[in-house]
Image (cartoon, coloured by chain):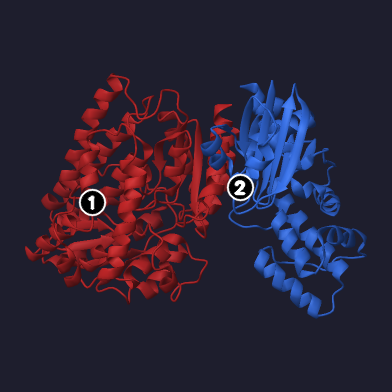
């Protein structure tokens, strides 16, 4: 499928070509086994297959071309970095993935073994020189979410050019909002100075509308997944939520809407990817970055369909819109702070809104059970898992708690648990 | 109808044939690198109408023989419901994992817990510890049973616990006290898992480790509740699988 030889481009970016080829070979195989082999996929997934096949190719070329035309590329790791501000200086926002077990041995030269797989992964990618997104970025934003990320950035910032550290509050209080606002102002100044552009009411309003349109397309997709039979697999829906972070926002929005048109026809015709009455699972917990597809793959291989993700790569990240109303920069910044302070990340305390959201998603998407997914050593989500489980089980909604990482060595025990959970739901 | 259940565990393979809920044949064999051959030789010369496979090798057997599958969690719950009808909590301690299952009427699974990717407290862990003390399994269990006091073992990782035991031996700790300490550490670990789900009586322990009388004694003490270990405890999931095969 890949006609163009991107090796010269990757070499220019300073990637290690041998290691990078190995990574792409593994990715291609996994994509074939997990995605392309799924039965009865919507036609609209062709676009996303294409994006994935070109994720280190054409998309990187687009970034390089954009830079040559004077635009700036901003790489980040977290939902709290407002894409609106990046677009307001005509920048390009890319989410850095960190979903593969790669370069772990090198990562452990900087990090204790008891660090979560996500942090190890982004260290592994930079140390093995296999991430073209980091290499094509003009600025990398690291945010103080959990202790693991916060402390690891102290080392990571030395490995990348132009690192911007962003502080984050830990409570959804007025003081927390003030901190978030001042950090967003500081980030906006840094973007202005990097790009030589000024954020205006017009440019920021326009950016807000672009990002809102993207979120609204995802909301539409999410609503369609409430149908029984489910018109799209959880794996495909997760993939779209992952591509959300990479793709050109306008093209992405159009493609998701086109897919949704097709899904509406499928629903009207009663056409699904699994039979009607198939057990329905909501996944809640840690983000699943590309190519972390292990758990959804196990779930959908073993008799259930995933109908929603309460996750950073999912509805936690996309649910709220930013108000575009306001005729001053100050008001628009307030709107941003309003929107972003409502993300229910487990680094916040208290964070009971997250459990409420899991609950409302379960009803909206008619889930029969919730799988709480946590990465090992991710203390915030591992801790919240107990509250999520207790609250939902009291409401007679079955919950399965899973702690895992990116390795495939626990697939069989996980399969046993997931299967037993589905047996429990069915009985 | 003759219904059969096969439980492909990490250490052993268990096979049961039932007719009208009576066991007409049972067999246990050590597993090998080739679980299909082990299964085939257990199945050979035993007639049955339907087979259900359980245990970690269930899908392998199902693909090869075309039979139904059930997880060992469901199979252990169903098997217990028949062998111990009052059972409401099943603790299945196998070679490489531990499951704690809360059950309702007729063996319906209400909740379950399973250990993460770690062998702590499993049959395999006990084997490694016995070997570190140069004891056979019966000696290891017996010595622990009569020890006057335990030496506290803190590590639950099989690798770390082994080196902890080796260094305690080097300090001159008696083997029987170490053996008891190991059993107590495992009992605490299992109890910690069990207490995450509603612990309702009757509590039933099954799986190969149910035969370890010292561990059952210590687990009873830690939980503060009586434990039932049914006859054929090691066969319970295979019996459950056979019952499922018969119910189709």
Q: Residue furthest left?
A: A69
For the residues labelled 2 and 1, the Cα–Cα distance comes to 39 Å
Q: Is label 2 in contact with label 1 (beta carbons under 8 Å)? A: no
Q: Residue furthest front?
A: B45
The crowding category of the residue bearing disc 2, from other C-alpha atoms within 10 Å (few below 14, some 14 to 19, many at least 20), is: some
- Residue A44 located left or right of residue A422: left
Q: Secondary structure at mark 2?
A: helix
From what the image shows, is residue A159 above or below residue A383? Answer: below
Residue at 69% x, 34% y: name it. B45
Q: Which residue is mark 1?
A: A53
Where's residue A393, x and y in %?
58, 35
Q: Secondary structure at mark 1?
A: helix
From what the image shows, is residue B227 above or below residue B116? Answer: above
The crowding category of the residue bearing disc 1, from other C-alpha atoms within 10 Å (few below 14, some 14 to 19, many at least 20), is: some
Residue A181 visible: no
- Residue A326 located left or right of residue A370: left
- Residue A231 located left or right of residue B223: left
Residue at 67% x, 33% y: name it. B5
Residue in front for this viewpoint, B247 or A321: B247
Where's residue A423, x and y in %?
57, 32
Which chain is red in the picture?
A: A
Q: How many marks?
A: 2
Residue A265 visible: yes
Q: Which residue is mark 2?
A: B35
Chain that bears disc 2: B
Residue at 37% x, 38% y: name it. A234
- Specify whether disc 2 shares its chain with disc 1: no
Which chain is blue in the picture?
A: B
Quarter of the figure with the C terminus of chain A: top right
Chain that bears disc 1: A
Q: In the figure, residue B130 lies in which quadrant?
A: bottom right
Where's residue A13, x and y in %?
19, 70
């Amino acid at each position: 499928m890949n006609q163009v030889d991107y090796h010269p481009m990757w070499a220019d970016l300073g990637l290690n070509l041998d290691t990078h080829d190995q990574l792409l070979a593994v990715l291609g195989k996994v994509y074939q086994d997990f995605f392309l082999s799924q039965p009865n996929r919507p036609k609209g997934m062709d676009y996303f297959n294409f994006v994935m096949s070109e994720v280190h190719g054409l998309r990187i070329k687009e970034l390089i071309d954009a830079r040559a035309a004077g635009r700036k590329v901003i790489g980040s790791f977290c939902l709290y970095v407002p894409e609106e501000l990046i677009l307001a200086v005509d920048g390009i926002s890319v989410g850095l993935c960190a979903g593969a077990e790669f370069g772990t041995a090198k990562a452990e030269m900087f990090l204790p073994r008891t660090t979560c797989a996500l942090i190890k992964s982004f260290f592994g990618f930079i140390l093995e020189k296999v991430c073209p997104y980091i290499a094509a970025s003009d600025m990398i934003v690291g945010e103080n979410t959990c202790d693991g990320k916060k402390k690891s950035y102290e080392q990571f910032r030395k490995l990348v050019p132009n690192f911007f550290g962003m502080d984050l509050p830990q409570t959804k209080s007025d003081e927390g909002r003030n901190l978030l606002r001042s950090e967003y102002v500081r980030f906006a100044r840094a973007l202005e100075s990097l790009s030589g552009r000024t954020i205006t009411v017009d440019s920021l309003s326009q950016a807000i509308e672009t990002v809102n349109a993207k979120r609204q397309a995802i909301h539409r997709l999410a609503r369609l997944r409430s149908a029984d039979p489910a018109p799209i697999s959880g794996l495909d829906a997760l993939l779209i939520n992952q591509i959300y972070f990479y793709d050109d926002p306008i093209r992405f929005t159009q493609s998701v809407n086109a897919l949704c048109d097709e899904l509406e026809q499928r629903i009207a015709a009663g056409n699904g990817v699994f039979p009607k009455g198939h057990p329905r699972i909501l996944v809640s917990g840690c983000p699943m970055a590309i190519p972390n597809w292990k758990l959804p793959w196990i779930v959908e291989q073993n008799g259930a369909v995933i109908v929603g993700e309460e996750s950073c790569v999912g509805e936690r990240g996309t649910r709220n819109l930013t108000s575009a109303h306001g005729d001053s920069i100050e008001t628009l910044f307030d709107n941003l702070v309003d929107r972003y302070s409502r993300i229910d990340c487990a680094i916040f305390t208290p964070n009971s809104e997250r459990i409420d959201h899991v609950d409302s998603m379960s009803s909206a998407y008619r889930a029969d059970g919730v799988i709480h997914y946590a990465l090992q050593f991710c203390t915030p989500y591992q801790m919240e898992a107990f509250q999520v489980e207790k609250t939902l089980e009291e409401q007679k909604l079955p919950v399965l708690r899973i702690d895992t990482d990116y390795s495939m060595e626990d697939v069989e025990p996980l399969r046993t648990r997931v299967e037993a959970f589905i047996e429990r739901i069915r009985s | 109808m003759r219904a059969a259940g096969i439980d492909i565990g990490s250490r052993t393979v268990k096979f049961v044939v039932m007719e009208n809920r009576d066991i007409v044949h049972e067999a246990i064999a050590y597993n090998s690198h080739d679980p299909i051959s082990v299964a085939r030789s257990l199945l050979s010369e035993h007639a049955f109408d339907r087979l259900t496979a359980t245990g970690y090798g269930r899908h392998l057997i199902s693909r090869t023989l075309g039979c139904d599958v059930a997880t060992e969690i469901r199979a252990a719950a169903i098997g217990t419901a028949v062998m111990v009808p009052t059972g409401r909590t099943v603790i299945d301690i196998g070679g490489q994992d531990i499951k704690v299952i809360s059950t309702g009427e007729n063996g319906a699974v209400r909740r379950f817990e399973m250990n993460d990717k770690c062998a702590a407290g499993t049959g395999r862990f006990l084997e490694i510890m016995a070997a570190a003390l140069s004891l056979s399994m019966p000696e290891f269990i017996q010595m622990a049973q009569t020890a006057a006091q335990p030496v506290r073992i803190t590590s639950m990782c099989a690798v770390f616990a082994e080196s902890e035991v080796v260094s305690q031996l080097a300090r001159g700790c008696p083997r029987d006290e170490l053996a008891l300490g190991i059993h107590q550490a495992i009992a605490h670990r299992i109890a910690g898992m069990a207490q995450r789900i509603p612990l309702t009586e009757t509590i039933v322990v099954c799986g190969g480790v149910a035969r370890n009388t010292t561990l059952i004694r210590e687990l009873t003490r830690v939980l503060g509740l009586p434990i039932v270990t049914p006859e054929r405890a090691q066969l319970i999931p295979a019996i459950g699988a056979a019952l499922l095969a018969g119910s189709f």
